Image (cartoon, rainbow, N blue to C red):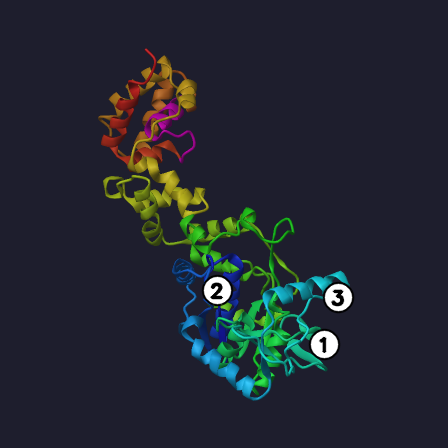
Amino acid sequence: MVRTRFAPSPTGYLHIGGARTALFSWAFARKHGGKFILRIEDTDLERSTQQSVQAILDGMTWLGLDYDEGPFYQMQRLARYHEVAEQLLQNNLAYRCYASKEELDLLREQQRATGLKPRYDGRWRDTKQTPPVGVKPVIRFKNPTDGHVVFEDLVKGKIVVANSELDDLVLLRSDGIPTYNFGVIVDDLDMNISHVIRGDDHVNNTPRQINILKALDAPMPQYAHVPMILGADGERLSKRHGAVSVIHYREEGYLPKAFVNYLARLGWSHGDEEIFSTDQLIEWFDLATINRSPAKFNPEKLMWLNQHYLKNEEDLHIAELITPFLEKDDCVVPNGPYLLKVIHLLKERVSTISELADAAVYFFRPLEPSYELKAQHFNQETKSILLYLIDKFASIEWSRQVIQDEIKKAAATFDVKLPKVAMPLRIVVTGEAQTPSIDAILELLGKTETLKRINQQIFNFPD
């Protein structure tokens, strides 16, 4: 059975690269009817936090990446790592190393000075010297000294690394905490992981991990190393490119299915398909079609994709998503016009739920026009026009067509072009210069609220 895993370190938020790795692992498991396991690699005691764990869980929930087993925590499995390390010691495949940090720092300095690659020199590998008193050793793996590690990466193809390039890595630190390379091996072995899908920053770790698995006479998973994600400028992805927490995009009002669609296209493709559902992703996903070259993160493309999904989303679902945004902006949603009608009017004009909420605020509470808008559009003539409209609006049937007719009649009565009526009216009612058609807005606001707002602003006009 296919069994994949996502194993983040809880030292920060779930970022875009991690989310894509999780998505690919999840999609591969779902396509093959397998299992997707979540592990939390929390052995970095100084930087791991429960807040980061929660951020990872929240991000995966928002993306819809449900896991079948876990989350498993490495710090709850210490006894198991010690058991495996002891097994390797008993079989003369590992050894205790008492070299101090100062010794190792000096060794690396000397190696650099002579142009050598900094690496542990195996000084405690087969020594007969007496261990120093009071020093807690690390446990190192006896890496083979000859031959090659050869494996077929499902993305990169055949990879060959000489064992002479690898030193004896630490398995357990002196405090008993496993290193990444050891903990991940024991976890993958115990959890029967069949496919390891991860970023290609781990490709250099794989030969070391394969050697440990061989020493344990363990089955070998298949490896797929996914190229990194770059910014649009070709530089390593960072916050300035938009590489922030996945939850940040939720808070900005992106739809999870749009975000998943975009993540999937970062380094993977199915023909020329740009827009597809999660079900289609599962059906089409294939490790063989992951690109070998780095993907580029493009915030504009993500926004375009989100706009597409937003336009096609059910208004009822959008209403659920937008309400917290409006309430955060001091809007009392039940007191305003019917929310679904507001959404229907505005959603073609925006790209995110956050933008939609910003565009809808004036429906739920009056906005004060800026000084610049008042100076440009408020004068004695427009005051007369608006006083005229107050009188006419008070007695008409409140429908879009009738409202539009009265606005046109006002323009004709005062012998001005239509914008000379519509723009001041828009500004006094909404506080904005850019909105949908003013007759549509007034119809939704209702007669009472419209007249109330015009009357309130009339007093701000010059005498």
Residue 44 numbered tag: 2
Residue 406 numbered tag: none
Mark whose residue sits in front, 1 or 3: 3
85 lies left or right of 331 = right
Q: Quadrant of residue 427?
A: top left
Q: Residue furthest top?
A: 463
**Percent coordinates x, y for residue 4 in the rendering:** 50, 74
**Percent coordinates x, y for residue 12 in the rendering:** 47, 57
Q: Which region of the structure is painted magenta?
A: 420-436
Secondary structure of the residue carrying tag 2 is loop
Residue in front for this viewpoint, 438 or 21? 21
Residue appearing at x 41%, y 68% in the figure: 66
Above or below, comparing residue 440 to residue 259 in the picture: above
To which residue does mark 3 refer?
A: 116
**Percent coordinates x, y for residue 191 in the rendering:** 47, 79
Residue appearing at x 32%, y 15% in the figure: 384
**Percent coordinates x, y for residue 152 in the rendering:** 65, 77
Residue in front for this viewpoint, 341 or 355? 355
Q: Mark 1 and mark 3 in contact? Answer it, CB < 8 Å.
A: no
To which residue does mark 1 refer?
A: 164
In the image, what residue type sits under mark 3? Answer: Leu
Q: Is residue 315 magenta?
A: no
The disc, 2 or 1, on the residue closer to the chain's N-terminal end is 2
In the image, what residue type sits under mark 1? Answer: Ser
The disc, 3 or 2, on the residue closer to the chain's N-terminal end is 2
